[in-house]
Amino acid sequence: MNRNFSLLGNKQFDLLVCGGGIYGAWTAYDAVLRGLSVAIVEQGDWAGATSSASSKLIHGGLRYLESYDFHLVRKALAERQMLLEMAPHRVWPLRFGVPMYADSRFCKIQMRAGLALYDFLATHPGAEMTHRHFNHRDFLARFPALRVAGLEDGFTYGDAQTDDARLVLELIAGAVDAGATCVNYCKLTGLVEEHGRVCGAMVQDQLGSTSVQVTARQIVNTTGQWTAATEQGRDWCRLTKGVHLILPAVLADEALLLTAKSDGRVFFVIPWYGMTLIGTTDRDYSGDLNHVTVEPEDVAYLLNETNHYLNTAWTEQDVVGSYAGLRVMKCSGKSSPSDVSRDWELKTARNGSHYSIGGKITSAREDAAHIVDTVCAQLGADVPCATRKRLFPWAPAGNYAAWSEAASARASQLGIDPESAKWLIRRHGKRVDEVFRSIENDPALAGRIVATAPFIHADLLFCARNEMAVHLDDLLRRRMPLLILAKLDESALRRLAATVAAAMGWDEAAIASEIETCRGVIHHALSPGA
């Protein structure tokens, strides 16, 4: 998967997609599979903003039942099931526990009814997704990290988990393989119109000063928070900020859905890459779109609410990493951001350019299919969606469980520890064989990069060589989320930069620059005092 800016000016495209998050990736992938000539540009790295700052969940949204948003929940649950089947390496089941305390916001009858409705909307969810009830003793045995005082019993139900940045990257890779021109670090600087209709765009290479006009018959903007900053976008969009924290492991292989004592909001405590992911906050945002930071009050809120439930007493010093992102939602008169619908819509401006507004990672595939339907109708092409029930680009064919077992056995033979092997297989799918071959040539590459995170040196080098990374933080935040899962000092960053320098073409000056940028990323992710 190579970056080639020069390809953008060579021909007329049927479709130019602006924005390389989950909606842009699905749109480009769907469109090129339908036979359209497609280009997609992203001003930063793939999934560089909201799409790498989610809760890492593929879920129907249990909390949306409270606002009677049954359509959204049913749509998301259908997509969840399809993704579990079509991308077993990328999306895997995750059960959630819901503890019932004497002072819980919802009583046992309400919770049982809500979970039964969730199962019903999923339509034949299967045993691994269906909710269950446990008495006090059995529930505590499943979740020993919970505070005992006041716990009466609890429920579990099924949803799913992913690595959001890897999900986007795999779709971009699939689009490239199908013939799309995909260029990151390529900024849209303006639209080009003829007779009041958009016919292309000016884009600038962020790795140089070159600009080029991209000629396209249709243009779709999937730029998220940057759409909200435009004159028309301000009338369409509402921005809210969500913050997540990474803390030491307290859960095994099941997550928790909890209700904040201070404001009644739902939040999650989730096992992720061997650590604990906590989030999210939900506050209206009107600040700098390019520097969305984790503030001290965000950290205090999440720690305080989590400490109500766990038998730990986490403080700011326990926070290993953090990140903040912006959600784009449709404008609403509702005062609380948490009450605003997460559903999606497509807007079309007078000049014919299209804008994707709102949505969720879980349902982005179906929404993107509607985008491409609209584009095809404008182009006079009657071609059905090609992504529904299509195996993901890196998904192995055949029986996934058998393939995964065989891959795990090979990883063990190569000296990869079991936890790192599990995540390596999920991260790369069938491409993991290429990573294995590199270890056969150099067994030292099977070792972990840092002791506390399940990433090996061969993985880092493979990403540097094959995944269109440009900067060190592309590798350490989105290709593998090491920057938020481990506390890396300058010497560790220098060691990692030196490891990939040859593959990335960096000299000593470039290494120093990349390290400084990474230090800035860490600083912005966790503001002073947090």
Image (cartoon, helix red, strand yellow):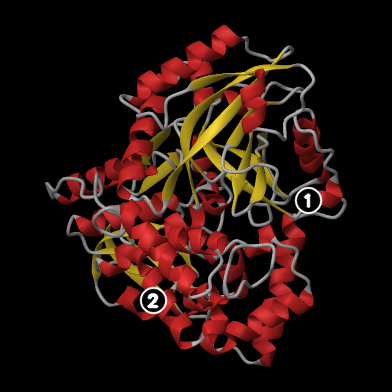
- Residue depicted at 81% across the width and 33% down the height: 304
- Residue depicted at 61% across the width and 41% down the height: 270
Residue holding disc 1: 319
Q: Is residue 129 visible?
A: yes
Residue holding disc 2: 434
Residue type marked 1:
Val
- Circle 2 — which element? helix
Residue 368 falls left or right of residue 456: left
- Circle 1 — which element? loop
Question: As displayed, is residue 18 above or below residue 236?
Answer: below
Residue type marked 2:
Glu
Percent from the top left, x then y, of residue 295?
Answer: 78, 46
Question: As displayed, is residue 60 above or below residue 22?
Answer: above
Query: Do the residues under discs 2 and 1 have CB atoms within 8 angstroms?
Result: no
Q: Is residue 183 visible?
A: no
Which image quadrant is residue 190 in?
bottom left
Percent from the top left, x then y, of residue 256?
Answer: 62, 33
